[in-house]
Image: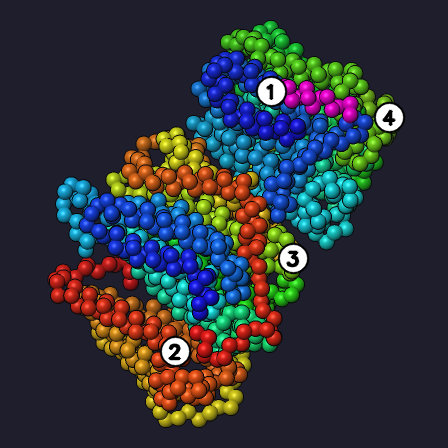
Amino acid sequence: MIEKLAIVWPEIILFATTCVVMLTGQWPVCAVRRMTPWLAAVGLIAAIGAAMASPPSDGLYPDLVPYAKSLVGIMGLMILPLLAGTVDRELEAGVARGERFEPLRSNGAEFYAFFLFSLTGLMLVASSDTLIWLFLALELTSLPTYMMVTLSSRSTRAHEAGVKYFFLGALGAAIFLYGFTLLYGATGSVNIPTIAAHFAEHGLGPIGLAGVLISLIGLFFKIAAVPMHFYTPDVYQGAASPVSAMLAFVPKMAGFMAIFMIVGSAGWGPDGTGLPVPVEALLWVVAAMTMTVGNVLALLQSSVKRMMAYSSIAHSGYMLVGVIAGPGGDGASFWRNGLAAVLFYLLCYGVMNLGVFAVLASLERKGQEADDIDDIRGLVRTHPPLGWSMVICCLALLGFPPLLGFIGKVGLITSGITSGHLALVIILAINSAIAALYYLRLVAAVYLEPASDTGFRPSRYGSRQVAALVSAGGVLVLLLMSNRLITAADDASRYAPVAPETAPYAEAGANN
Amino acid sequence: MVLTSVFSLFLLALVAPLVTRVAGRYAGWVLATVPAGWAVWYAGFIARVGEGEVITPASLVWVDSLGVALSTRVDGLSLMFALLVTGVGALVVAYAGGYLAGHHHLGRFYGYLIAFMASMLGLVVSDNLIAIFIFWELTSVTSFLLIGFGHDRAAARTAALQAMIVTGLGGLALLAGLLLMGVAAGTYEFSEMLEGGITLGDHPLYIGILVLVCLGAFTKSAQFPFHFWLPGAMEAPAPVSAYLHSSTMVKAGVFLLAKFSPVLGGTEEWAWTLQIVGGVTMVYAAFLAARAVYFKRILAFTTVSSLGAMVMLLGVGGPGEAAAMGFLLAHAMYKGTLFMVAGSVEHQTHTKNVEQLSGLMRIMPVTFAAAALGAASMAGVAPFFGFTAKYLMKGPIPEAAAGSFLVIGVMAMGIFMTTAALLVAYKPFVGKPNEAASAGSEAGPALLLGPVVLSVAGLIGGLMPGLFVQPLVASATAAVTGDAPEKALSSSIGMINMGTLLSTSTLAIVLGVVFYAVRDMLRRTTGLMDRLDPMLSGPVVFQRVLSGTLWFGRLQTRLLQNGSLNTYIRTTIIGFIALVLGLGANRLKNAFLWQDAERPSLLGMILVVLLIVSGVAATVFRYRLAAVAALGMAGVASALIFVFYGAPDVAMTQFAIETLTVLIFVLVFYHLPQFTSFTGRMQKFSDWVVSLAFGAVMAGMVMLAVQTDMAPKISGYFSENAVPLAYGRNIINVILVDFRAADTFGEIVVLGIAGVGVAALLSVSGRSQNPTKPDGGVA
């Protein structure tokens, strides 16, 4: 137990920060309230530092912890400036006019606390090595986001989105919890490496197979894969852009790490192509459908947020290709290692996608954020920095070479090819082509179309624009660092199932 | 140094707007000096490369783990292209200064143009497959910017998007092809493939690679049926057409095929694909050129036709490569000339239609001279370079498998090319100046320099082939075939019968003149083509596919993504059932076989009945509180199962949670209005079916779990270890406070928090008198 503490230091730091933030967020003194995001940032930076020094975990992916938690911390830092002005706008305006501050009407404390809670949960997902930890961590990641969706906007649409998100999320959680119990039933252990060792020795068996399949289907909710994707467009559109930006990254990352663990317990076999047939078929079908449904429906949208929601679905489909390809055999290079490709792509996707939402969040008309594609026409001319950020991020999302999304996609494609899934790679390529249509529509609207006065002005929360510029800059800077990042992702994806005889066969019941 | 040339141009592109502001109307000349300097630098390699040397500077590693490096390699083929890119590029930059003089975005235009130049240069000198692809796509995006430069016009925007989509789709295919190629060859460095003597003709992935690479090359080089984007791209300003659409970008496809032919060529599939696609394009586009009336459209179609000829020659193989290279160089010169002439005429007279112009010869004499030289080369009149190129071409073709067809095709192309040459260089210039022509005047030096230099170079190339044509074409051919430069060229020249060549050329020219004379009739009788061509080519197919996809998407949205939470849950559950049954049916079918069917106890039966009744009741009750009570009953019944089957600690927790849940539900529902709208009968029925199916699947899982050998029972462990480990005799106590102390602590926390929540709800219910309005959206 004590040795585990060394791994969860980042979570402990974030949790402590959360407690502080909960207090400062509703402090009567305005200056203290203003400090809240800065405190959150300090906590995140400290958590990143702790994450980088983290020892390997006992899980199936011992070295996942430093990479995943640093990534979570960095993305948290990038999302943080975007959150400014999402809640308590009228309240703070009132206080500025000299009204009394009423803590009961304020949501700032909860909002930032939920944000940090969710990130804590996300980090815990990376740390978890038992199914129970995994379940709790996944729920800790998701539950605060349900609240954040509802808090983020006063419109009924946000409330409706929150309710939908919650109900479907509960359905998803129930499904993967059921899968987890079946896994326990099949192996008599909740320890994931032990489960993997059991499966390696005895094979999956009907109940183990059912456990893996059902867990995966439930986890598809987190990554917004078909058939668990329905909430995505409604929720992304209903929530305020800063929260949508977070939703596109946080649950997806959690879901993929959990999928790594579940698929990893079934195992890719010694040569890296031995994924059990039904599991591979499930991932294959879902990957193909997710890409296609996401991209085709994105074509129809005129709301940029809905478009990005569908594109988020499609990107999950791309990443599932890497999961199918698996880590490869021993000493496989990056272009065979699908898991490393996914980990790297998560980073790319997080940054690129954040840029688009940050641009939307930076434009306001009478307190309303930009959403329709008409709202951003000619943006390059009216607000050049925002416009160019949009262009760069869209081209990167589309996978335009040599931008970040391209490097990420190359990893996914090569892992797909080298693991022998040509048909899936072709589906991926066709889908990238479909995706080009709507991303280019965005680029064309921003860059080619003449400027018209839409009434949208840059938000008075300047930090939102900073977030947009940082994301666009990140797309370019990370490009130069991509070799180091890919190496890091490659190390992080080291898949180390314990040999059956040395597996920690803990006595039953004592391991939870 | 080679990489420096690429990056210096990118840098120049960045500062171009600034230079334009400083240097004003001389900006074009100033900016042109840089590419001109690089052209001279590259020209210095002609002798060395001509002797068969290959220049491979040190490479710049970028993403090592992906095998991506910015490595360069200058062989004959690359050198020829590098010279075209920088040389013609310098002329075009100067030309643009005259053509777009005074345009308020001129600086930006220079920037795009030079960025394109840098990308194209990077493409031709790169050795790494991924780097090639990166520069390939950069040419697409810069050309998108250039075609859409006049983006205040809708036509320019449409054309730019169309070109981008077509070349972008091709680019994706190319990416897949290049990655497959890298996987098949084990390296992304092209020079390593050459040195290792790797040919992929026998590789199992070969067909895939060939198809994908060809798709990339054919879309970029506007081969049938992807040819439509090039005439559309004529919306671009003339300098763009002269540069991208004659000498550089559209040749990238040909370049790629030529470059890869040592690795991918030499197979039946390669030969047939290239010959058929190239041959069809060559004849078809030449015919369209002969019946077009707009200056730049005529030129665009002849370009497509020439590109087809080059692809076809590469497919013929053997000495065909030499012909392709010679033709490529010749074409770059005369087509560059003619596009610039077209631009000058348009710029000076504001007329695009050749039929509406006459007598320009007197008004624009220098332009006319350049046009005449270029057109003569295009028609293949001796002794122009175009003739030399044709001379190279006629040799190898009869040797090919489909030789006789190809000879007829080349003949047809020659005829229509002559007609097109007359249309652009004769029709507008001869006769009496008409009104449109008289409005114009001779172009300035910036507009004249390009056409004059290129057309004179074409003449010199024909008259003195040894000067630069022979070493360039020979070393380029050597790079394609892998032979020594001398041998590569001589084998092709030796095969030609001069008499036949002269007679067929003359015949082609004569027939071309005849067609020119009857061109009005030609256009009228083939009027069907105006409607047929769009149907044969991309836009219509593309539109169909797109609208089909959109239709599917709308249908999907209406049926499934309709915003109703009910639909979402229903669909999700159906999807779950389908996936689990579809994938697991084979292994799960045992679940429903009753093996050692145990007689259920009476108590068990009662609990089951209770569970079922309460479940059904929860769905049929019309009052929330009643439904909640039914749910609570179900919870209690399941907790009783734990009580009777040996897990009292779990049961205790379950009871506590159930009670709290019901309490919270009741408190929340107190604020909600009554149910008002009820689901219809049909809806209810289908929901029943879905729920029963879901329940059946879950029940199947449970049965499966029951049959499987489960893990050892935990209870034994507890009873054995309660005393030795925990010093306690009350096993349940020991479990709660010792073995599962952490669980118990968690439960206490959860219950505490829930209690706080209940307290909060109770305090709110005292204050709020106005319950929130029902939200119709959430059903």
Mark 2 vs 1, N-terminal side: 1
Confirm or deny contact between disc 2 and disc 1 (CB under 8 A): no
Name the spot of residue B497 as percent of width and height, x first. 86, 26
Of residues B17 and B434, the one drawn nearer to the viewer in this rendering: B17
Check chain identity for marks 2 and 3: say if they share one: no
User: Magenta region: which residues?
Assistant: B36-48
Q: CA distance from mark 2 to mark 1?
A: 78 Å
Q: CA distance from mark 1 to mark 4?
A: 44 Å
Quarter-of-image position of residue A143:
bottom left
Protein chain holding label 2: B
Check disc 1 and report the residue beneath it. Answer: B34
Mark 2 vs 4, N-terminal side: 4
Check disc 4 and report the residue beneath it. Answer: B497
Quarter-of-image position of residue B409:
top right
Q: Left or right: where does residue B646 sit relative to residue B294?
A: left
Q: Residues within 10 Å of mark 2 (few under 14, many from 20)?
A: some
Callout in the foreground (2, 4)? 2
Check disc 2 and report the residue beneath it. Answer: B740
Q: Amino acid at mark 2?
A: Arg
State yes or no: residue B504 in magenta.
Answer: no
Can you say whether B746 is above or below B257 in the image? below
Q: CA distance from mark 3 to mark 1?
A: 47 Å
Q: Left or right: where does residue B634 sit relative to residue A340?
A: left
Of residues A12 and A474, the one drawn nearer to the viewer in this rendering: A12
